[in-house]
């Protein structure tokens, strides 16, 4: 193997694949990145046996070859190099990859490429084509709501429900729920539902560049896997077995108060409240107050810390209905407000004991539900 590649391109490729590297496996090769040549390009792959991320980089390939090298050492070394050409060459007899960039040289001891797990190939003819940017937004608006512990494996994933021409994605950790829908005219098959690990979808979102137009989704038959194919990146993930909980019963059928606020102003107030809410399980009070005599209403966000103090912030709001005060996990509020692109956000509430619904104003395909917290006195 003999390759020349720009340092910045190599560093970017490693940043994409290295997050799939296993940190706890007993198999040493899973801590490595596969470095190989493929049709005149440099190919990088990493896996933890649940997720596989592969990235292709433009390079000058003088000699074919493949090796696996320690991911962390390789990434740290590449990031320390100047933005010049990096020359890679392989001594197959010792499984050592030589690196040279400007006045820096290094040798990395690796493991033979044939010990690396087989990487599945996508079949684009059987794939579902979606708009990459829209799919990235869908991921960002739902994946953060998935559970992070494994006590209920299905909740660590995102439900993807396909119907002809339509996709619904949902995630919940039992305290909050995100639901996003979108048109996918390319899908004309039967209705189906799968659960994809939220972590895998987050890696897909990270890999989608601003100039990426199309993403292909394929489901290899009989392998319980899903593949996301971009122009230079492929993410493969195992599917989560089981049934995603039916979340329709927790969606409020009505509300008594609807408050519309500037998204950025409300987000800023919530972030301020979160400073004082850390010691109280992130609990903050939000009081929605209609205006008097034609005056604008308000949303008042307050948090209290026994040791640090307290704060209160007021945001102008158009409040329809009666006044209501609800205790929310303010971290959950900042999470959802951070993924809303609309300039205004609406929060629908009923009582202090019932969930609130967050919706971007003017966007009908996304909503988020937050369960209320117990009022402390």
Image (cartoon, rainbow, N blue to C red):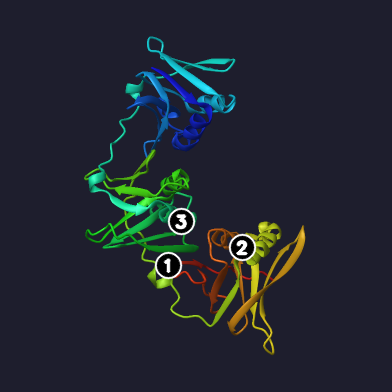
Q: Nearer the viewer, mark 2 or mark 1?
A: 1
Q: Which residue is mark 2?
A: 330
Q: Tell me how far mark 3 sits from mark 2, CA to CA.
A: 22 Å
- Report the front residue among 309 and 19: 19
Q: Please tell me which of labels 3 and 1 falls first in the chain.
A: 3
Q: Which residue is mark 1?
A: 365
Q: Position of residue 73 (x, y in %)?
A: 53, 24
SS state under label 3:
helix
Q: Residue, x 52% and y 22% (percent of image)?
A: 85
Residue 334 left/right relative to 107: right
- Report the front residue among 51 and 79: 79
- For the question of whether residue 207 can be seen, the reply is yes
The 10 Å Cα crowd at callout 3, few under 14, some 14 to 19, many 20 or more, is: some
Q: Tell me how far mark 3 sits from mark 1, CA to CA.
A: 12 Å
Q: Residue, x 36% and y 36% (percent of image)?
A: 49
Q: Which mark is residue 137?
A: 3
The 10 Å Cα crowd at callout 2, few under 14, some 14 to 19, many 20 or more, is: many
**On screen, residue 371 above or below 278:** below
- Report the front residue among 257 and 28: 257
Residue placed farthest to the top in the image?
Answer: 93
Residue 308 left/right relative to 336: right
**Quarter of the figure that contains the N terminus:** top left
When asked about the image quadrant of residue 122, the answer is: top left
SS state under label 2:
helix
**On screen, residue 160 above or below 85:** below
């Amino acid at each position: 193997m003999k390759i020349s590649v720009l340092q910045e391109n190599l560093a970017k490729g490693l940043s994409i694949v290295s997050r799939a590297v296993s940190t706890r496996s007993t198999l040493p090769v899973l801590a490595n990145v596969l470095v190989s040549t493929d049709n005149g390009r440099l190919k990088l792959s990493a896996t933890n046996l649940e997720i596989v991320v592969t990235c292709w980089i433009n390079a000058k390939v003088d000699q074919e070859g493949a090796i696996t090298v320690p991911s962390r050492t390789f990434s740290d070394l590449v990031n320390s190099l100047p933005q010049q050409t990096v020359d890679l060459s392989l001594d197959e007899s010792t499984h050592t990859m030589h690196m040279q960039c400007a006045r820096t040289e290094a040798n990395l001891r690796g493991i033979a490429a044939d010990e690396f797990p087989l990487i599945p190939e996508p079949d684009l003819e059987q794939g579902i084509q979606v708009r990459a940017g829209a799919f990235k937004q869908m991921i960002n608006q739902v994946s953060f709501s998935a559970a992070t512990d494994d006590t209920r494996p299905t909740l660590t994933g995102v439900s993807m429900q396909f119907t002809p021409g339509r996709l619904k994605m949902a995630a919940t950790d039992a305290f909050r729920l995100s639901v996003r829908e979108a048109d996918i005219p390319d899908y004309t098959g039967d209705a189906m539902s799968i659960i994809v690990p939220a972590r895998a979808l987050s890696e897909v979102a990270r890999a989608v560049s601003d100039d990426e137009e199309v993403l292909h989704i394929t489901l290899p038959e009989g392998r319980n896997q899903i593949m996301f194919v971009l122009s230079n990146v492929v993410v493969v993930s195992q599917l989560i077995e089981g049934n995603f909980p039916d979340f329709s019963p927790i969606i409020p059928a009505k509300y008594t108060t609807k408050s519309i606020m500037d998204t950025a102003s409300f987000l800023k107030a919530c972030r301020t409240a979160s400073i004082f809410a850390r010691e109280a399980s992130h609990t903050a009070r939000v009081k929605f107050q209609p205006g008097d005599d034609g005056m604008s209403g308000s949303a008042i966000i307050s948090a209290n810390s026994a040791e640090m103090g307290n704060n209160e912030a007021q945001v102008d709001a158009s409040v329809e209905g009666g006044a209501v005060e609800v205790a929310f996990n303010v971290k959950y509020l900042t999470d959802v407000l951070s993924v809303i692109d609309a300039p205004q956000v609406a929060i629908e509430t009923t009582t202090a004991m019932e969930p609130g619904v967050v919706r971007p104003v003017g966007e009908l395909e996304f909503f988020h539900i937050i369960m209320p917290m117990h009022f402390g006195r």
